[in-house]
Amino acid sequence: MTTPARTISVAFVRRALAALLSEAAWKLPTDYVAALRRARQQEAAALGREIIEILLTNADRARAERLPSCQDTGMAIIFVEVGQQVHLVGGDLNAAIEEAVRQAYRPLRKSVVADPILRENTGDNTPPIVHYAIVPGHHVRLRVMLKGFGAELMSRLAMFPPAVGVDGVKQFVVETVERAGPNACPPVIVGVGLGGSFDTVGLLAKKALLRRLGTPNPAPHLAALERELLDEINALGIGPQGFGGTVTALGVHVEAAPTHIAALPVAVNLNCSAPRRAEVIL
Amino acid sequence: MNAHTLHTPLTDDDVAALRAGDMVLLSGVVYTARDAAHRRLVAALNRGEPSPIPLAGHVVYYVGPAPAPPGRPIGPAGPTTSGRMDPYTVPLLERGVKGFIGKGHRSPEVKAALVRYRAVYLAAVGGAALLLADHIVEARVVAYEELGPEAIRELIVRDFPAIVVNDIYGGDAYEAGQRAFRRRR
């Protein structure tokens, strides 16, 4: 059975993506703001509460003035889901995506260098990092993160043997947050990838950061792991901005995938207290 | 909490009065520099060339600001992670820099050098970039313009809020804070 194809122009994708990126820079996700408000009640440290209040005020101001909440508007990380009934017309999709980034970042900071050794700024925040997926359906789904690199830099990956088990996984995750300390701009959001291979476990951790706060993994054993990790991380005492406190992380999200009989890959991707992300379905 | 109102350039007495955990409201001139500017600045100093900015008594702010919106001196301008500048910090202390503003841990070498050279490390609230920019009343590029967001800027700040992390007595507000709230291991 064949379903008729849907035609979408790449110019339409470009406009939608540029708008999404622009909005993500000034509009922090509602689930994050709600979690931060709860954290303000929960935090035991007076300075910690004061810092959370500052972050909430900053978020309000960013939204009201449509200015970036943080100067580091990151690299644009873009997840593109293309329904297999979609026919993209009117040009090169990759070029349209780059152009959207170029447009959206015109008023934002340009934080991308063309080569990790030579380090010359590209001047327009391109290229973005783009992950494509072909899925059933007639839609194009765009999900973006403007990923600050203070937290990215403190992220870690390990290829453990299976004998390390869940206790070893927990130790690695908690240790990563502890080593990051104030550098990752706590309260952080912790994305954990488990399984897959060297190249995919990091992507799982990043996808974990796309999930809305307060939405546990549907698998009971992974939801339990998320709760245990959150308790252990908040017992570290790092607190808001690292000055001590009871709220070090707002959430821990674990994503798991099948892996090899020889391995237990683990990746921990941290997100800071300006977790800019947004989504649209075309 | 102890709140100190300070004007740059800082004196030895200004710095001696600060203790880890104190709040500071800083006014006066502050110079911005982050990764690429530090690399160039310290390479120039090592070659015996003059510094493009005054260092003695001055304060360096680790920041790469966002572009200025119309009618404002600067865009959002919160601190970046200080530890990346650790390898370049001692040469600046040797030339009399009295304060650094950033966020995050410093290396044991930098903390020891802050004590030795009588200088302080301050943290501003990371992620509060828009509120911090309110305290920056003027900004102009003074060196390495081609580095774009990483160029060295001279800022005039007014009551710029920061917290003393490392003082000249070896105090560390991050360590003390975490110790007070730790419930694990």
Image (cartoon, helix red, strand yellow):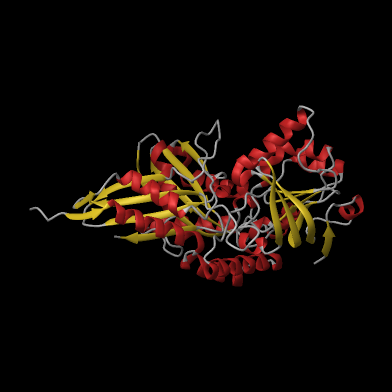
Q: Residue furthest front?
A: B71
The quadrant holding residue A44 is bottom right
| Vertical comparison of B112 with B65: above or below | above
User: Left or right: where does residue A168 sit relative to residue A41?
Assistant: left
Q: Write the residue at 81% across / 43% down.
A: B55
Q: Is residue A255 among the parts visible in the rendering?
A: no
Return the x and y of residue B106 as percentages of the image width and height.
Answer: 72, 44
Along the line of sight, the residue nearer the viewer: A21 or B106: A21
The structure residue drawn at horizontal position 64% and vertical position 60%, both measured from the top left corner, is A240
User: Residue A96 location, x and y as percent?
Assistant: 34, 48
- Please state which of residues B48 and A149 is positioned toward the viewer in this rendering: B48
Q: Position of residue A85 (x, y in %)?
A: 18, 52
Tell me if B118 is positioned left or right of A130 in this view.
Answer: right
Seen from the viewer's position, the closer of residues B137 and B88 is: B137
Q: Quadrant of the C terminus of chain A?
A: bottom left
Above or below for B82 versus B179: above
Q: Is residue A60 above or below residue B142?
A: below
Please give the name of the residue rendered at 43% of the width and 45% of the height, measured from the top-left corner. Answer: A128
Tell me where residue B41 appears, x and y as whole percent: 72, 36
In the image shown, does A248 or A122 lie closer to the viewer?
A122
Question: Quick one: which residue is furthest to the bottom in this view?
Answer: A41
Q: Seen from this angle, which residue lies furthest right?
A: B13
Q: Quadrant of residue A43?
A: bottom right
In the displayed orientation, state which residue is furthest to the left.
A1
